[in-house]
Image (spheres, rainbow, N blue to C red):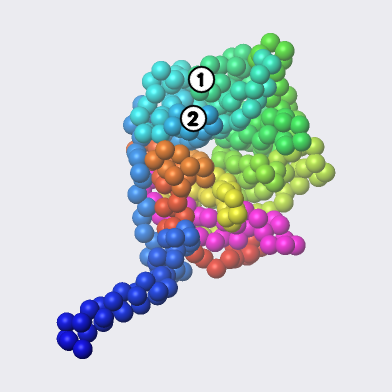
Amino acid sequence: MPAEKIFRVAVLLLLIAALAAPPSAAQSRAARGAAAPAGAALPTVKPRIVSETVKHDSDDPAIWIDRSNPARSLVLGTDKDADGALYVFGLDGKIRHDLVVRGLARPNNVDVAYDVMVGGRKIDVAIVAERFANRLRVYSLPDMRPVDGGGIPVFEGERARDVMGVATYTRPADGALFAIVSRSDRFAPKQGYLHQYRLVDDGTGTLRGLKTRAFGEWSGKKEIEALSVDGADGFVFASDETFGIRKYHADPSVEDADDELAQFGLTGFARDHEGSAVFRRGNERPLLFVSDQQAGELRIFELEGPAGTPHRHALVGRVKYMAQETDGIDLTGESLPGFPGGLLVAMSTDRTYHFYALDEILGAMSSISPISASSP
């Protein structure tokens, strides 16, 4: 056989072998969004977009998805100051100045709820904790029109009224909307630290708050600000800063609703346990993301424990990212323009919000062998 023909056959055989070979470990992880090897140095994930700056002090984001046109989806972000505001950004990180709500007295946290009955029709709403006014403010989405009659008072009759955190829960059985709120540590009680309110239309197209319960323990170490809700299973997670994460039922009507179900994340954090967000998507493993503020990382826990121990939340991964000293985070697994694998938004102390590709965050996750919640 001529040498040239032998060379061609050899090249062809090499190409066939390369195509038939299994993908590398790195290629397999990228394809399935799996974790990086345990013990590997954490890569730093870069944001796809950094928002325009707020005036004073960025604190907490919330993502609103326009289900009729995802390109018109918005990111809300608080500007925490006595001369504060609720900022509104497009998916490009640009401020929507026509929608920004100004004149809020130190707004801390914000959350979003969908399909809320107001004035005889279903609307989506943003709910923000206005700390210095001791109240919640509620705005319709996407026009940011107030629907709360000037505000919903919280922690009435108590000495500790500086509301900070807010998370919404919509009960699947009847569509009832609840707001769960936390507060600063000043004069706060160690029992009943959290309050919960049912938000209802008073018949005039205005939402009012009806207190349903006071619940939740506090370590007394710092404060509980960040809250997140797993709406599918009906649980609320509260970040007790410098202590750990506490878990309760989100539905006040279930049996033993006030019982604490779990404590986890009790070790390993650099200092403060901050913003948290729930990840659920299709058949993927449900996760809880928590900001390890001083480490510049996200610590990631199993959202659902193994059979027989549903309230065991093992630490399964860490991700390092560029956001600085993150308080609040929010995420969605839904595909959005520019973020086909989902979006994670994190507050950064440079007065911005960082928009990350969620699939890149998941792909960069450094895996950790599951650790039981009883020995975190």
- The quarter of the displayed image where residue 170 is located: top right
* Residue identifier under label 2: 69
CB of mark 2 within 8 Å of CB of mark 1? no
Residue occupying the point 83% across, 44% down: 255
- Please tell me which residue is depicted at 63% across the width and 34% down the height of the picture: 168
In the picture, measured across the screen, residue 297 lies left or right of residue 282, that is: left
Percent coordinates x, y for residue 279 in the rendering: 56, 48
Quarter-wise, where is residue 251 in the image?
top right
* Quarter of the image that includes the C terminus: bottom right
Helix, strand or loop at disc 1? Answer: loop
Mark 2–mark 1 Cα distance, whole angstroms, equals 17 Å
x, y percent for residue 121:
66, 19
Q: Amino acid at mark 2?
A: Asn
In the foreground, 285 or 168: 285
Q: Is residue 315 magenta?
A: yes
Q: Residue furthest top?
A: 204
Q: Earlier in the sequence, mark 2 or mark 1?
A: 2
Q: Amino acid at mark 1?
A: Met
The span shown in magenta is: 297-325
Instruction: Judge the density around disc 2: few (<14), some (14-19), many (≥20) Cα neighbours within 10 Å.
Output: few
Q: Residue at x 64, y 49 (%)?
A: 246
Q: Is residue 140 visible?
A: yes
175 with respect to 49 (left or right): right
Image x and y of residue 83, in percent = 43, 21
Seen in the picture, residue 112 relative to 306 is either above or below; the reply is above
User: Eyeballing the image, is 292 above or below 201?
Assistant: below
Extreme residue in the left direction: 3
**In the rendered image, which residue does mark 1 sit on?**
144
Q: Secondary structure at mark 2?
A: loop
Which residue ends up furthest to the bottom in the rendered image? 1
